[in-house]
Image (spheres, rainbow, N blue to C red):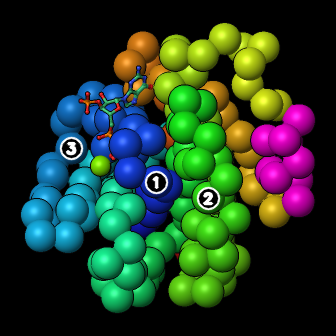
Amino acid sequence: MLTIIVIGDGAVGKTSLIKKYTKGSFEKDYIKTIGAQFSKYDEDIEGNNCKLFFWDIAGQREFDFMRPTFYKGSKAAIIVFSHTDEESFNKIPEWHEDIKSHVGDLPIVLFGNKIDLVKEEDTENEKIQEIVKGRGFLGYFQTSAKTGSGVYEAFQAIIKNLYNKYKEA
Ligand code: G3D
Ligand code: MG
């Protein structure tokens, strides 16, 4: 089982992205009181069945005490920000430090979601590339959970990375 945490500010599109990628076929559990959601999904990679487990951690800071439980056992992380929400971009370092403090170095990819709502030339690509390089993220993908643009490629990047890392184990 490969556990991937999906984090980022509220309303950036975490749940929608997971839904889109899994075509809604995930088994979903929802912890209402804390807003956390976990999704199980079976995927065939090169003919091998992989069990993916996505954590969609709610942004509410009052549930910070629950965070270590979520992070435990995670093998990779997806940090999501929205192109329509500058604050969600500015929070990337905080989310990254949060991951590092709980699980250390994990492969991380960055998703810039809601690309359908902005013009390409309005995205701050230099600033984004700077943070990707500076923090050693595996990659950056522009996604739209609404149109589906980029979603498959983005998830595949992290899943393939994990698959290659763990297939020998
Ligand atoms: P979260 O899980 O990160 O909190 P959600 O975010 O997946 O719940 O999405 C928050 C809102 O943004 C939802 O709108 C959702 O439909 C919308 N959304 C998510 N991704 C995209 C995207 O790529 N493009 C556009 N245009 N909208 C997106 P509602 O209105 O349902 O609250
Ligand atoms: Mg959500």
Say which element carries label 1: loop
Q: Is residue 153 visible?
A: no
Q: Is residue 130 above or below residue 165?
A: above
- Does 144 sit left or right of 64 as displayed? right
On screen, residue 18 versus residue 142, left or right, reads left
Residue at mark 1 to residue at mark 2: CA–CA distance = 8 Å
- Disc 1 crowd, CA 10 A, few/some/many (<14, 14-19, 20+): many
Q: Which quarter of the figure has residue 21?
A: top left
Give the distance between the C-alpha atoms of the residues marked 2 and 3, in whole angstroms: 28 Å
Q: Are marks 1 and 2 in contact (CB under 8 Å)?
A: yes
9 w.r.t. 167: above or below: above
Mark closer to the chain start, 1 or 2: 1
Q: Is residue 104 above or below residue 79?
A: below
What's the residue type where badge 3 is placed?
A: Phe
Q: Check disc 3 and report its element: helix, strand or loop.
A: loop
Q: Are marks 1 and 3 in contact (CB under 8 Å)?
A: no
Q: Is residue 85 visible?
A: yes
* First reached walking from the N terminus: tag 1 or tag 3: 1
Q: Residue at x 78, y 14 (%)?
A: 121
- Residue 127 is one of the magenta-drawn residues: yes
Q: Which residue is mark 3?
A: 26
Q: Is residue 164 left or right of residue 33?
A: right
